[in-house]
Amino acid sequence: MIDLRSDTVTKPTAAMRQAMATADVGDDVYGEDPTINQLELRAARILGKEAALFLPTGTMGNTIAIKLHTEHGQEVICESRAHILNYELSMMAWFAGCVARAIHAERGLLTWRQIEPEIRKLGPHCAPTGLIEIENTTNMAGGCVYPLAQIREIAEGAHAHNLKVHMDGARVFNAAAALGCTVAEIVAPVDSVMFCLSKGLGAPVGSMLAGTRNEMDRGRLLRKRLGGGMRQAGVLAAAGLIALEQMPARLAEDHQHAKALAAALSGCPGVKVESPVETNIVIADVGKSKLTAAAFSESMRQRGILFNPISPTKIRMVTHMDVSAADVNTSIAAINEALHA
């Protein structure tokens, strides 16, 4: 099967498996796992932040960041399709005691002009704003990328209101590849950032949270509360180091593959690709074609291609390192067969 459901389905490379087998390990709860320590130091340097924290999942990273920057009873401003709002089991409420102030933005990219009117001060009726969150790239809005100037404007405006900005940068390395800049340039204005090692970078497990050293020290305690106090986790960090050092350079290939899939879908009757494809995510509305999203997905599954329907009319395809150019060509042929037949 050609699996386009997500870039989370990648298998670790041979180099990752070898690194995992030979990793130098210790007890990370005691701070004694040398491979974990190396990964955290390297991630912080690449992101230009004081410190970083290794986590089993991105959801845990976002949850910890929200808790670090807010108090119970506050609001978190985010885009209406944000992962923290829709796909993290209400952890901002359950763990951080906050609720979302959701704003719908074109292509999922918030602007300061949209955000500022939604900021609330403490009063007798309104919950105060505690944090602004942006997602880069935009997962359910088609993998769109924030322009650097837009991030800076949001951060400068937030800081003027004494608010912090957290970036859910699960695919921020894809954003850097699309913009042709460093990840450090993208995240410099924000106060904290989470990114996943286990998506486009191909590691089997793991995400990183980065920010100030004080925040990461506090975050380590929150990680323990959430059950993330792992022991000889250097076997996971070893794969993460390979992902961090070797895999960003190939992300542009995934982007080209996604654009080819988008072009094929756009050429089919009754299909509209939602956003200009910038990275590795394609969201298309097939509502005016002859098939529902679920029927199209099933038809493609029977042809050996997997992807997810995300609404009655919309589908989502995600390219990654285990999808080759030949796989893309096979998928395009199947798309044309299913939607033109």
Image (cartoon, rainbow, N blue to C red):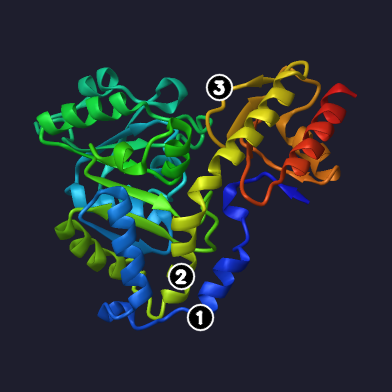
Q: Name the residue under label 1.
A: 22
In front of the other: label 3 or label 1? 1
- Is 211 positioned to the left or the right of 327 in the image? left
Residue extending furthest bottom? 26
In front of the other: label 3 or label 2? 2
Which residue occupies the foreground of this view, 86 or 56? 56
In the rendered image, residue 44, in percent from the top left (x then y), is placed at 28, 56
Which residue occupies the foreground of this view, 322 or 132? 322
Q: What residue type is labelled 1?
A: Thr
> Residue 276, labelled with which disc?
3
> Residue 238, labelled with which disc?
2
Residue visible at 19% across and 48% down in the picture? 69
Question: How many residues crowd around disc 3 within 10 Å: few (fewer than 14), some, or many (20 or more)?
Answer: some
In the rendered image, residue 198, in percent from the top left (x then y), is placed at 51, 56
Q: Which amino acid does label 2 sit on?
A: Ala
Distance CA(mark 2)–CA(mark 1): 9 Å
Q: Do the residues labelled 2 and 1 touch (CB within 8 Å)?
A: yes
Residue visible at 55% across and 67% down in the picture? 16
Q: Is residue 204 above or below residue 73?
A: below
> Residue 232, labelled with which disc?
none
Q: Which picture quadrant has residue 191?
A: top left
In the rendered image, residue 147, in percent from the top left (x then y), is placed at 36, 26
Mark 3: secondary structure: loop
Q: Disc 3 or 1, which lies upstream in sequence? A: 1
Residue visible at 55% across and 56% down in the picture? 202
Mark 2: secondary structure: helix
